[in-house]
Image (spheres, rainbow, N blue to C red):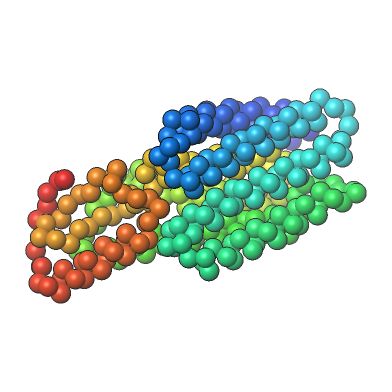
Amino acid sequence: MAPSEKTLELVTVMCESMLVGVYAVLTALVIWLLSTKHRTMPTMHKMLFGASIIMFFISVAHLALVMAQLASSKLSKQNAQGRIILSAFQFMIGDLVLIWRVWVVWGRNYWVAAPPLAIMIVAASLTFNLASHKQFTTFFTVAPSALVVANTTICTLLIAGKIWYARYQLRSTGGGVIYAGGAFNGTVVLFIETGALYATVQIISLVLDHVKSEGIHVLLDLEMPLIGILPTLIIVFVHFQLIGATGPKTVPTSRMQFEDSNQVNLDTFTSSMTARGEMDRDAKSSGHSKYGLSTA
């Protein structure tokens, strides 16, 4: 027997509250970083951390509206419109973080980042248009949701493709690959960095809506804190230098050295990869065919 509507609403509030609690801990870390590292922190990181804090308050406001609706005996049009508007802003900021990551990984190439940005603007416009309708029966419409899923998938493929291609180049030029961590850790980090988890959640919501599952209402509300948590993890990982330059490293001199991760500039992922590739080719052309290993 399918659970009642009231039961689903209670499950939604409980699960969303747990995720907002997790997000609160992450936000506390972000605020601590801003207060203690603001003098040495890059301006871009400050802006991204600020966006993360805004997304947290949007999640809290959305949870408050969900709880208000649960306490009410009838569906409130203003409450529903408010949740749609909040979700639009949340999706926009979350997508902007992914688009920024695409821009960085692709060597600050604006042409690569332009299509996802255009899709994001169209999807947001359609969502705001939905909120302005006088009558509606569902939060989930095919056009804006499909565009959001498509945009997240495109960003995920662009980030993952560039990273995998860079690793392939290093494997080809360096004769081997040195990973800055275990295979499991590398997979988890890559899964977060590329936004694959973000895209997976959105695809599941699209499938649930297609099959007319009651679970769609639960997942849509859970997406609000998730949309904030996952991009925030990307920002925190970048700040602590856990992604961007954690891939394979090769130095083509008379010996191969392992670089200290603290000396790596994470915002120059692509340029550093290209520079290493060029150095490898120069080393090969000058007759360096043998490499030793030493730890720096």
Tell me residue 230's x, y (percent): 53, 43
Residue at 17% x, 62% y is 252
Quadrant of the image occupied by residue 221: top right
Q: Residue furthest front?
A: 39
Q: Residue furthest top?
A: 71
Left or right, 116 with reference to 249:
right
- Rendered-image quadrant of the C terminus: top left
Q: Residue furthest bottom?
A: 285
Q: Nearer the viewer, residue 29 or 231?
A: 29
Residue 192 visible in the picture: no
- Rendered-image quadrant of the N terminus: top right
- In this rendering, the count of numbered labels is 0
Residue at 67% x, 37% y is 58
Q: Residue furthest right?
A: 134
Residue at 61% x, 48% y is 93
Where is 285 relative to 243, above or below? below
Tell me residue 172's x, y (percent): 25, 67
Residue at 20% x, 58% y is 251
Where is 280 relative to 233, above or below? below
Quadrant of the image occupied by residue 12: top right
Where is 280 relative to 211, above or below? below
Tell me residue 141's x, y (percent): 76, 54
Residue 252 visible in the picture: yes
Quadrant of the image occupied by residue 229: top right
Tell me residue 187's x, y (percent): 38, 48
